[in-house]
Image: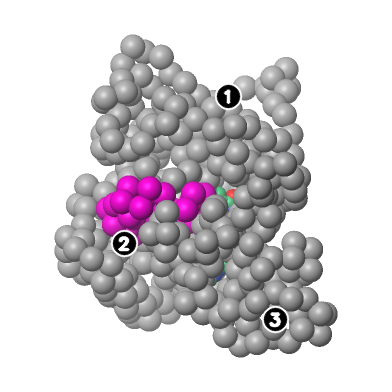
Amino acid sequence: MSELTGVTILGSTGSIGVNTLDVLARHPERFRVVALTANRNSEALFQQCLTYQPQFAVMADPVAAEQLEIRLRAAGQPVEVLAGAAGLEQVAALPAAGYVMAAIVGAAGLLPTLAAARAGKRILLANKEALVMAGPLFMAAVREQGAELLPIDSEHNAIFQCLPPGFTANSLDAVGVRRILLTGSGGPFRTTPLEQLSEVTPNQACAHPNWQMGRKISVDSATLMNKGLEVIEAHWLFAASPEQIEVVVHPQSVIHSMVEYVDGSVLAQLGHPDMRTPIAHALAWPERLASGAAFLNFTQLAKLEFQAPDFGRFPCLQLAFAALETGGTAPAILNAANEIAVQAFLERRIRFTAIAAVVEWTLEQVGVSTIETLTTILAADVAARTVANEWIAARMAEDMR
Ligand code: NAD
Ligand code: MG
């Protein structure tokens, strides 16, 4: 019998984390869970520890880590509990875990995901924000340490599947690729009358037509910032210039993205919208594994539609393209401002339509620098959060009127 592959899941209590555990549980002959991590929810991580028996459990929040430790001891579970950023980085680089699922949401995932790259792991990358913030550093760490970077974002996983086998981000031209066609559903407000957008609630924004996801990415999908972040993600993963990436709105989310070749061929990856498919793909690559996802029934697919994105309705998409063109720390600034604005919207402190305004304002206020080191990126992130919070503090009352 072959040896089991050890897997660390960063963000195991989230939507991607839970789907990953579901796929792993279908293949106990191949994988074992080495480490699980979560932010504050010690109850959820405790339950996962009982079920999956990892060696390590990490809570980002130290108080939650203590609670988890007490409960595990009382239950007689020999799980080692770690806390904080150091604990996250430690389990991302464990010798016993060859694979690391990077599924923390937002900038909080950057350092542990980078630690996995520096330790030469197979990284299953869901945490797109890490790559958006630190693209050049991250890709360099992957190359230098011989890490494997496999995209979990359904679009990028689809593109990876449609590129020549073993494509490693050098040049799309060299393999005859003309364009990447990045599909997106258009989110829950694709057809909402424009004048109603300022009134939509967090729950409406999180009611995605095709995907069940965490609240932050759900709001990003509603503003199309998610598609913007994905454009930047595609740039780094596939060495695609902004001109080589076209966003195509496809409301049914059956085609997960496409690659167009110079000879006119277009390759697409299709499937039922279920994140377990890209997760299983990245776990098994270059082999294939059952994921638990339903299979497509073509006779029941009524129609597949395609449209151009409405940049006027969704200014965040344009802001992301512009940040990619600007380069340097601009994507990190865009990402940080967006995280602050989305949080404020979810807490009902600003309107849905103010998210783009906060991001635009922050990009205008914070100076962009070239990326020299991680410190440059983290400084841009902090500066952008400060400016975005200032916008919110200054205009909140007037915005909500
Ligand atoms: P989620 O909110 O459901 O889960 C986030 C996870 O990260 C949780 O386990 C949480 O405990 C942990 N976490 C949150 N803040 C943290 C912090 N400060 N420190 C440490 N851990 C923290 O999010 P999700 O929907 O699973 O998304 C995770 C990532 O995957 C995001 O980057 C998202 O863009 C990406 N992604 C998600 C989907 C999806 O279908 N959900 C699809 C594509 C990409
Ligand atoms: Mg996606």
Q: In the rendered structure, which segment of residues is drawn in magenta? A: 121-147
Q: Is label 2 or label 1 in front? A: 2
Q: Is label 3 or label 2 in front? A: 3
Please tell me in which quadrant of the rendered image residue 59 appears: bottom right
Q: Position of residue 190 (x, y in %)?
A: 51, 42
Task: Specify the color scheme.
Answer: one colour
Q: Is mark 2 on a helix, strand or loop?
A: helix
Per the image, is 168 magenta?
Answer: no
In the picture, the disc for residue 332 is 2
Labels 3 & 2 near each other (Cβ < 8 A): no
Q: Where is residue 103 in the image (x, y as percent from the top left)?
A: 54, 58
Q: How many marks?
A: 3
Up-down relation of residue 391 to residue 287 (above or below)? below
- Marks 2/1: CA distance? 35 Å
Which residue is most to the front?
1
In the picture, the disc for residue 68 is 3
N-terminal of the two: label 3 or label 2? 3
Residue position marked by numbered label 1 in the rendering? 304
Q: What residue type is labelled 2?
A: Ala
Q: What element carries label 3?
A: helix
N-terminal of the two: label 2 or label 1? 1
350 on left or right of 300: left
* Label 2 crowd (10 A; few <14 / some 14-19 / many >=20): many
User: Residue at the spot x=49%, y=30% of the render?
Assistant: 161
- Marks 1/3: CA distance? 47 Å
